[in-house]
Image (cartoon, rainbow, N blue to C red):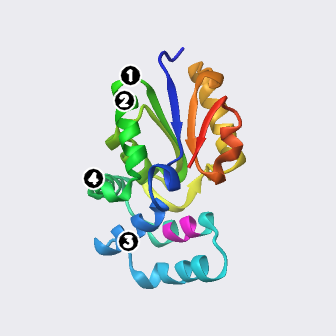
Amino acid sequence: MVSGQIVIYDLDGTITRLDSLYFFILFLLKKRELKLKKILPALFRHFLIHKDPLRLKISLLQSLKEKRRYALEDLGRGFALSLNKIFFRKKLFDLIKIKKREGAKLIILTSALDIYANPIGERLGFYKVLSTKVGFKNSIINGCIEGVEIRNLYKVLALKKLAKEENIDLARAVGYGNQDDEGWLNLLVQKIIY
């Protein structure tokens, strides 16, 4: 059984001010690892027609198809290290530091892609990050996600699975999320919505 307080955070719009995917795309463009002409149609569709985060993620992964895992992981780590404090909500950033000092086990539960969500969690000292997995075949990105996007009902299922595997009592856990996170937050007795 995991000892100590368990604190579960959503990433996008809770720990961060905006969706981290947008910043990751900008980072890749700046590093010339992504061509604007490949992602521009998906960005237009996302912002002007219909916001569909999964479709945008898949468009990004299709644009990065054939990249090697280690190269993408290096980019994810570089992205996480490049983020300055303005990217994070100060109140939550400070709270995370306090909870870490108190010995709490911190978990991120996010629909963000693991290639950058995991390094962000590592940088902030999180115990575990549950995120949407990028698909690879023979260590080369296949342009898809692996399994399902960790969003809505799938956040609930991922959290229940983790609780079972690690013997976590969700009734004792505290959750921080936003209005989009009510599904998984309802599993917890203590929840704070930002």
Q: Main secondary structure of the magenta part?
A: helix
Which corner quadrant holds the N terminus? top right
Label 4 – label 2 distance at C-alpha: 19 Å
Location of mark 2 (residue): 100
- Specify which label sits upstream in the sequence, 3 or 1: 3
Type of amino acid under label 1: Gly
Q: Position of residue 161 (x, y in %)?
A: 64, 31
Q: Which mark is residue 103?
A: 1
Mark in the foreground, 4 or 2: 2
Q: At 33% from the left edge and 71% from the top edge, which residue is drawn?
A: 33
Instruction: Looking at the picture, tell me which residue is in the foreground, 20 or 74.
Output: 20
Location of mark 4 (residue): 81
- Specify which label sits upstream in the sequence, 2 or 3: 3
- Image: magenta residue range: 56-60
Type of amino acid under label 3: Leu
Vertical comparison of 181 with 100: above or below: below
* Crowd class of label 3 (few under 14; some 14 to 19; many from 20; radius 10 Å): some
Type of amino acid under label 4: Leu
Please tell me whether mark 1 sits on a helix, a strand or a loop: loop
Mark 2 near mark 1, Cβ–Cβ under 8 Å?
A: yes
Task: Determine whether, in the image, residue 110 is placed left or right of residue 121.
Answer: right
Type of amino acid under label 2: Lys
Q: Position of residue 132 (x, y in %)?
A: 55, 50
Task: Determine whether, in the image, residue 66 is placed left or right of residue 31.
Answer: right
Label 2 – label 3 distance at C-alpha: 30 Å
